[in-house]
Amino acid sequence: MTMVAKSAVRTRSGSRLMIDALLANGVKTLFGYPGGAIMPLYDALVGSGLEHVLCRHEQGAALAADAYGRVTRKAGVCIATSGPGATNLVTGIANAFMDSVPMVIITGQVASHLQGTDAFQEVDIFGITLPIVKHSYILRDVSEITSIVNEAFFLAESGRPGPVLIDFPKDVAVAQYSGDVDSTKPVYEPINVDDEGVAAAVAALNDSRRPLLIGGGGIAISGVVEEFRNFAARCSIPVTTTLKGLGVIPTDDPAFLGMLGMHGNEAANHAVQNCDLLMVVGARFDDRATGELQKFAPTARIVHIDIDPAEISKLRSANVAIVGELGATLNAMVEVEPVDRHWREQCAAWKKEFAWRYDAPGDGIFAPALLRDLSRMTEQELTVTCDVGQHQMWVAQHCRFNDPRHHLSSGGLGTMGYGLPAAIGAKLANPAATVVCVSGDGSIMMNIQEMATLKRYGIDVKILLLNNASLGLVRQWQQLFFGGNYSEVDLSDNPDFALVANAFGMQSRTIAQRGEVTEALQWLLNTEGSAMLHVLIDPRENVWPLVPPGRANHEMMRSV
Amino acid sequence: MEHELQIELRDKEGAVLRAIGMVERRGFRMQTCHVEKPSGDSQQMRMTVRSARSIGVLQRQLERLHDVISVQRRTPAAPVKTVQQTARGTAK
Ligand SMILES: Cc1ncc(C[n+]2csc(CCOP(=O)(O)OP(=O)(O)O)c2C)c(N)n1
């Protein structure tokens, strides 16, 4: 803790104190939607200097704040009214929780004397969100606002980040306060490097013959991409990543074997299953990454490095566990020897054997090839946000990323509807970026109203809509694992998305032939302002390869 | 496996719910639970929980809650089989 800084100031309302505390915490942009109980805060917002982005659904606001937080590594902020406004935020809060994204959420609440009486638009959002927040508060007294907001930002952004909710009752928002304000901000004290753990990890690495490095989402979250790359280069170790780790090593780096897991690259999965040491940095053994846990990396000793002690040995027990700052820990691992050449050659051979193929038959548009081309078209790397489904997996497999914050994907929660609001958050967080939202015809409908947000603020986001007239990923599972019993996955009665885009003031084009792809992608990227490229693809296309449920990662299906 | 936990909490709104929620959602059944506020600004919680899952992981998950000050764990000795259980072979 720093010194206590107390300042007596003029009389201010609770809402004004809230705005001042947000400004003092560096907030510039926030995402929200007004309503009854939060009206005092909206009143104070006018002329405050904060840029408020009116999304068209609170879920859109929360997901935009999530992406804003991922890109800036500072808490994204969203606000909503009590009751339905607050409950509409829930998916976005859970999304941030599952992916350890810094976020501060402010919800209006009915006045204190009405709480617990089933008042109009009263819901216990504090209770509803208990399992999906890092921490939460109900403001009970106007004098606490500044210190609670400061603590909320501190908790959201420090250690393993996460969402922190502040429920803001209307009477507290309108109360006047002229007493002392404790504006102390907690200060993060980094964890000291665990020298013993580092020595044990280095020894384990040097003793191993077939080591493999897994880079997870924690690397982007803690901003230690360079430290990670330097470490990997020091020992010339083969590298794989989780979905959220994509970009921690450049896609084109010879040591990179691709993503591991259910829709990972076979080279990465073979390396995992055959390695004798797995060094896991900022990842948490998610079941989509491990496949059947009992069969995961059966011959490997585990070195697990994470800032969160609760992740250690949660799913797979670690032989060497280091709880600490990822960057400092990696930097301390100096005495590492280069990895055995034969193992590196074996990994390189797998990489060659299982390189992606793009020679699909026919004239139809092959989405993997389109995505590969898209991400290699511009000199400045694109920021790609995606929704959830087959298109999300194709982005992960085929787009090129040199920076994990250029790939925004809902990993833990798998939230259809993430892509468009995330693109808004990402573009506002980094206006210089070219942001493309890759979506599916199912997912785009989940937050399609945010096209109005694009229009309202002139936000330049490109939408690449891969339309297979179905809930593709679910259809694929029904085909493969439910005997072709297709249940509620047909979307052939979709609206004409190109017209929908036009209605929201966006230019659009529709393509269906392979020969049109290059020119159309150029059109999309060169069009001024937001635009949609609507791409019709074969509904029968599947994501390959795939680890079937209950199988080990190397037992991948490659076709029907 | 049955375990006994002694949890010291900040005396803050929601602290008890958060701790109980964590125990149950992470796969433990509460057998007993006792909360009291001796004095000052902390609360003491004592509970016995049962699960096949690792109590060490639960302890760390509890410890990372902002309102949790400390978690002590005491795993009681394995229950002594009753004559009836032994006879039926149902003792766990
Ligand atoms: C909010 C939400 N509801 C349901 C699901 C389950 N789900 C996962 S993928 C998917 C289909 C997605 O379809 P689409 O967006 O068209 O993408 P495609 O798989 O066709 O590329 C569904 C329904 C989900 N992940 N999120």
Image: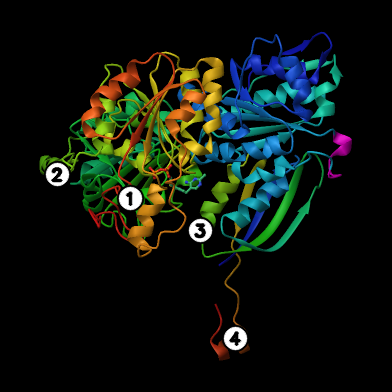
Structural distance between the alpha carbons of marks 3 and 2: 35 Å
Q: Say which amino acid is labelled 4.
A: Gln
Same chain letter for marks 4 and 3 = yes
Front-most of A449 and B19? Answer: A449
Front-most of A192 and A21? Answer: A21
Question: Residue at the location (74% across, 49% down)?
Answer: B44
Residue A165 horizontal/vertical position (percent) = 66, 33
Front-most of A25 and A277? Answer: A25
Structural distance between the alpha carbons of marks 4 and 3: 26 Å
Q: Quadrant of residue A304?
A: top left
Give the structural element (helix, strand or loop) at label 1.
loop
- For label 2, the crowd category at 10 Å Cα-Cα, with few meaning under 14, some 14 to 19 and many 20 or more, is some
Q: Quadrant of residue B40?
A: top right
Structural distance between the alpha carbons of marks 1 and 3: 26 Å
**Residue with the mark numbered 1:** A262
User: Which of the numbered marks, if any, corresponds to residue B54?
Assistant: 3
Circles 1 and 2: CB distance less than 8 Å? no
**Residue with the mark numbered 2:** A343
